[in-house]
Amino acid sequence: MKKLFLFILFFSITSAGFCQLKSHSFEAIDSLQQIQKRKIIVFIHTNWCQFCQRMKSTVFKNQEIIQKLNSDFYFVDFNAEGKDAVRFNNQTFKYRPTGNNVGVHELALQLGTMNNQIVYPVLCVLNEKYEIIFQYSSYLKPQDFKLLLEKLKE
């Protein structure tokens, strides 16, 4: 009984400050916007991109960033090479093959293209009307990401 109590106490202490990042699908955003209007932050990445993986393991594991994203924004974690069709903003976007077992999703191109190219990782911020209000294409350190969130909140 004492061991069980200590286990529960330890678990509650270690998990109390730990918060998971809520990632939403594009399909869910329409419903969420009906409940509460928020800006949408889309993280466009690939599995092979080292900078994308670094952002996942640093920026999106930072508890302060997670809390701000969960409370003030809708966050979408989007793999640019995902093969599933996505319905968003009354349109259907599909995976577009570009070669042998290679391709890119149309929605990643729509949201992540800057100067006629897409360079990963991409942060794309949409307003409540799904208009792009900010794009950034490169690795962003946690402290810089925190500043960006503060500016977007204003």
Image (cartoon, helix red, strand yellow):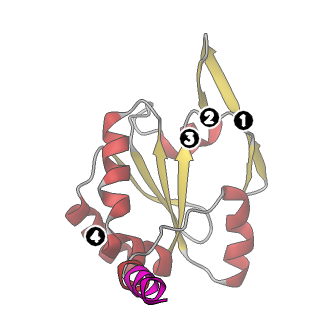
Q: What amino acid is labelled 3 in the image?
A: Ala
Q: Which comes before the other along the chain, label 1 or label 3? A: 1
Q: What amino acid is labelled 2 in the image?
A: His
* Residue displayed at 50% across by 73% down: 73
> Marks 1 and 3, how far apart in space?
10 Å
Question: Which residue carries the number 1 mark?
Answer: 94
Q: Tell me the SS state at disc 4.
A: helix
Tell me which secondary structure the magenta stretch mostly adopts.
helix
Question: Which residue carries the number 3 mark?
Answer: 108
Q: Are marks 2 and 1 in contact (CB under 8 Å)?
A: yes
Q: Is residue 122 left or right of residue 132?
A: left
Question: Which residue carries the number 4 mark?
Answer: 146
> Marks 4 and 2, how far apart in space?
28 Å
Residue 149 lies, in percent from the top left, at 34, 71
Counting other residues with Cα less than 10 Å from the Cα at mark 3, is it few (<14), some (14-19), or many (20 or more)? many
- The residue segment tinted magenta is 1-11
Question: Which residue carries the number 2 mark?
Answer: 105
